[in-house]
Amino acid sequence: MPAEPAKIPDADLLHAIARNDEAALSACYDRYRLILFGLILRILHDREEAEDCLQEVFLQVWRRSRDFDESRGRAFTWLVTIARSRALDRLRASGSRLRLATEAAQVPRDEVGDAAEEAVQSEQGAVVRRALAELPEEQRRTLLLAYFEGLTQTEIAARLGDPLGTVKTRTRSGMMKLRELLQGKLRE
């Protein structure tokens, strides 16, 4: 990679990874490990599981970077989607959410707080959080339940006591508004 890794656009990093450029994978990992780890940890509530899952995410990025299509979305969105999917797969495979919630309650608060603080300190984490804060409360709550707690739209509807159609509309509207708010604020 000829340019300094921090200055290479995300899409170019993924294209370099597709060409088996290990330095590009390393740069991508350095750039996104904190925010992706924070997302995974919020879903799994288990630091060790989240660490393993993060490794799986970057293994998938290495193997599937050729699948990234700029015309379908941003590189950051592609990475977040992979991380969320891998975390939800782990959550489903490991048994019931009740068991995981019980284990998470036993984890000392400071362990979870350290990882969450690292993600919050991430430059892009701050940008996303500011954008989330600008969403209407109903949309923000729906997106947080979906992406950070790993709930399906049906589960969100049940938890909030709202019709499924309302939850679907809030999710779609929230994602569209979030995309609008983040346009040009995150690194390519």
Image: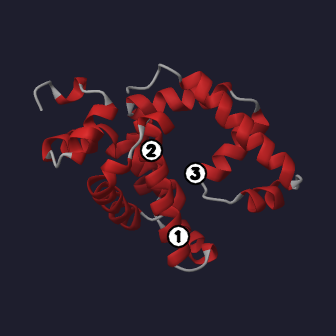
Q: CA distance from mark 1 to mark 2?
A: 20 Å
Q: CA distance from mark 1 to mark 3?
A: 12 Å
Task: Report the front residue among 27 and 1.
Answer: 1
Residue beneath the point at 46% across and 56% down: 41
User: Would you name the residue on which mark 3 appears?
Assistant: 148
Residue beneath the point at 26% across and 54% down: 62
Q: Residue furthest bottom?
A: 95
> Which quadrant, please, contains the C terminus?
top left
Task: Report the front residue among 22 and 147.
Answer: 22
Q: Position of residue 32 (x, y in %)?
A: 34, 41
- Residue density around tag 2, few if under 14, some if 14–19, many if 20 or more, within 10 Å: some
Q: Residue furthest left?
A: 2
Q: Position of residue 68 (x, y in %)?
A: 38, 45
User: Would you name the residue on which mark 1 appears?
Assistant: 91
**Label drawn at residue 78:** 2
Task: Report the front residue among 168 and 18.
Answer: 18
